[in-house]
Image (spheres, helix red, strand yellow):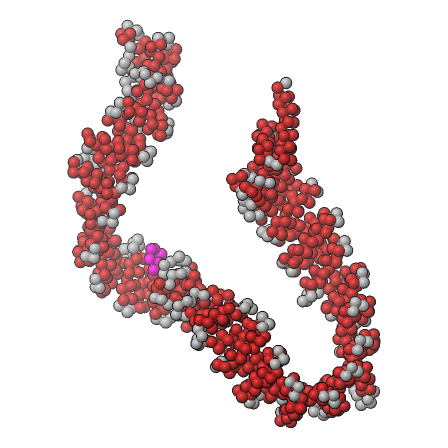
Amino acid sequence: MMRKIANCLFASALVPFLNAPLSAATDPFWPRLEDMVERSAYPLALYEINHAARPDAEKTHLDYLRGYCLRRMGQDPEKALNGIPRSSVWFLPARIELSEAYLSSGKTEKAAETMALAVSMEPLDERVERLADLYFVLGKYEKAAECYEKLSKRKPAFLYSLAWCHTRLGNYPKAMATWQTAISRLPQHPMSQEARLCLANSFLQLGRPLKASEQFRFARELDRAEFLAAEGLMGDGKNDLAIAHYRLVKGPFEEAALYGLSFSLGQQGRLEEAKKSFRTAINRFPKGKLLSESFYSLGRILELQGLSEEARAAYEKSIDADQGATERSTYRLVALLFNKGKNEETILWARKLEKEFPKSEWLPPALWAMGESAFALSDYPQAIAAYDKLVASENLGFLKNRGEEIKYRLGIAYLRNGKFEKAIEYLLGCQANYAEDALFWRAEATYRLGKSAQALWSEYLKRYPRGSHRFEAQYGLAWGYYRQSMLPEAANRFKLAAEGLSDPKLKRDALNRWGSLMAQLGNWSEAKEAFDRVEKADPSDPGNRFQKALCAYRLGQLDDAGMMLESFVSTNPSAPQNKEARSLIGQIKMKQGRFDEAAAIFETLSHDPALSQEERFEHTFKLAACYQNSGKAKAASEVYSSLMKEPDLSRDLQGELKGLMARANLQSGDLDSARLLAEEDATASLWAPETLDEVSKKYFEKKDFSGASKTLLAMKNRTPEQDLLLAHSFLSLGDATKSIPLLRELSLKKNSLQRTVLFELNKVQREDGRFKEALISFGRLSTLFPGKESVQAGMDLARASRDRKEPAVAREVYKAVAQGQAKTPVGRAACFALGELAIEAHDYREAAIAFRRAETASPPHSGLAAQASYWLGYTLVADRRFEDAIAELARLKPDGFNKEEIKTWLPLAWLKQGEAYENLRRFSDAEKIYKKVLVQGEESERREAKKRLDWIAKNIKKGSKK
């Protein structure tokens, strides 16, 4: 059948002289012409036909003969044959001849249509057969089946062709029924053998190997029949019968049969026999197609027998064979090694499976094994990575409801590793067995992210009022309120948390924070209660006793506070709060108005031999503070001055006292005196620079910028912060010439201020009109500190330079922004601006590049993309690249963009496209474009289009008519 179809050229031809005129008996023309055709002298016959003067009645006959000769000469006969009218007796022969011509020239579709017309006029079996064959060649199997079915009613041999059509249509049941009918009716037909094979293949397509085996047996394909019978029996669970059939198979199916035999033995639990059979198959076919499968199945049997090392060797050989079982063998190695506790090797083989088979159905359990092995090795990052991939695969069925456990463990692991967002992600998935714990830890992770977890803590306490983490939740909720500056609520929650926290450190912290918040809120009595409870929890803490005394002091219980502090000092002489307690005793005396006693205390402290020199200075300062608290800052300065006159004071101590006196002057507002004192000792002491720094800041706060600059200039080794303050002072004085060099020098130093200084320098240069210098500082800014702020600084510089007629600087800035922010709205805006400036400078190449970048950065099919395409086309027209401009502007089509977004740019694009056509002198194309503008453009655009159309009509069309 297929050979017949493949050679579907019609060899037979109609007798061209079947209806020759009766005058042929006396007229020599027709016999001579017949002789030429019979001798295949087609060129001579064609010459005779073309030059003969014959009556009109013979015209159709001659046209048919002309087409007949042309086809055989390899020329196109269509014109000659199609000229024959339907009423002519030669119309039908011409259709058949024309069908042959179409088929010869490869026009099979036309050949079928023409033959279908001939069949409709005279449905002879030969023509129906030819039409069916043509339909089959064209793949129109349904139509071919209709023709073959008609023919098969008279000629059963066509049943074979009909069955082929059903097979090609995928209608296997109908094809099988037709094959069986054909075989039963014509069992000796040459195609009966092929029919049985096709019938067997159809049974295989339907998954019925036993039926296929019967047909192969009839077709004398015994080995294949035995093999398929064994496969079918094994599929039906009849392993004993399958084994018997497998043993009978020889020839090309022997390897597959031997594998099936071994597999069937294994299915029956006959492991020893199966093992021997698999090894026989491996030895007999060392390069067989089923070698990998055989090693894999052998490994499974060995694994069932507990021979793990031999099983491992079999799996590794299966992998080395590099055939179909590599994936399964790799997984079995992972499972085998994991069950044996060989964690390092388990991880190695699991990685191999993941790398070589990333979509394997065995990858999830392999990832589980990898994660468990990594945990066993304390390799927590790798374990997390494995579990993360496992959860992402969403294939956790093999774990039998343990998927939530993995998510919970991952969430806790990420929380402990500081990856709080990932922890939240996984804990959100725990809504069943781990819902309570997951909600608590999710709140904890949210809090550690610096976000408010107040809602989550509240939800936990509402859903689980008796939950195991309720006190920790109260503690977390307290912190949430504290961050929101809701201090009373925070204090109350800290109090509630302290009631049941089991962790001593957390409980003590909650009590301390409750007391501290109460103190901050001015509720010193409750604060004192909190510190009392801290003392009960930890009586050995001297710091808590000090806090209690401080609360009594704040409650105005000065006598009690003084007594507690004196007791604290006497009983805890080495406590870190001892000195502060003695100082507080002095402050209590001061509050009681007993300044002399307070001064005596501080004087005593300052002469305490146990105190260091620095501590004496501190208490000397507090001595002066006694005067300062009473509003006698000058008196404090005199105290410092008198101390400086002591003969036994060291030089360093004198310097410190001078510093304290300067500070007293500073506090009294005498900045000039403080500055002079500091300048005297500017290089010899440590306090002078600090004092000068504070003096300069005070000058700056009072807007005495001259004083601030003088003070800062007096400093020999200024810090970057002080240099920045000096630059600000110069700027405030309007002296940019001094400020800019200072800022430029500061900007070269790599420190925490470099970014601020660079921004300041760029701003000052821009505002002072130094655009080229600003361009340099912007370059450094965008390189060292890329980001939105630097981009914005660049855009500000570009706008300023553009406004001040410095387009070259603006172009450089826009170019840098466009390159660094290609996909952002700012980068897109820079591209548009760069394009505009380039057009103004007649640099059309740079303009085209800029607009192309703007188009790429714009959302597809958006108005911005349409705008960029328009300006690109505009640039190309300006650059006289008219063909490129037409192609670019033609991309702006209404169906490719949102109608609302493109309606502004489409008429403009058409106008530019029309301009390009005009420059190319393609005025008809230009007219078409301008007419579109008249329909869809705005008023101004329609006027321009009308103007151009009038010009073309006047100057082009009128000229052509002349």
Query: Could you tell me residue 321's position as x and y percent?
Result: 34, 57
Q: Is residue 431 above or below residue 217?
A: below
795 and 599: which is toward the camera: 599
Q: Is residue 184 magenta?
A: no
Query: Residue 669's spot in the image, x, y percent?
Result: 80, 75
Along the line of sight, which residue is nearer the eye, 69 or 868? Answer: 868
- Residue numbers of the magenta segment: 321-328
Instruction: Please give left or right for residue 907 compared with residue 390 in the image.
Output: right
Residue 904 visible in this rendered orientation of the protein? yes
| Residue at x 62% of width, y 41% of height | 871
> Where is the C terminus found, in terms of image quarters?
top right
Residue 14: x, y in percent?
28, 20
Taking the magenta stretch, the answer to whether it contains residue 322 is yes
Residue that appears at 68% across and 56% down = 793
Picture quarter containing residue 747? bottom right
Q: Residue at x 68, y 67 (%)?
A: 751
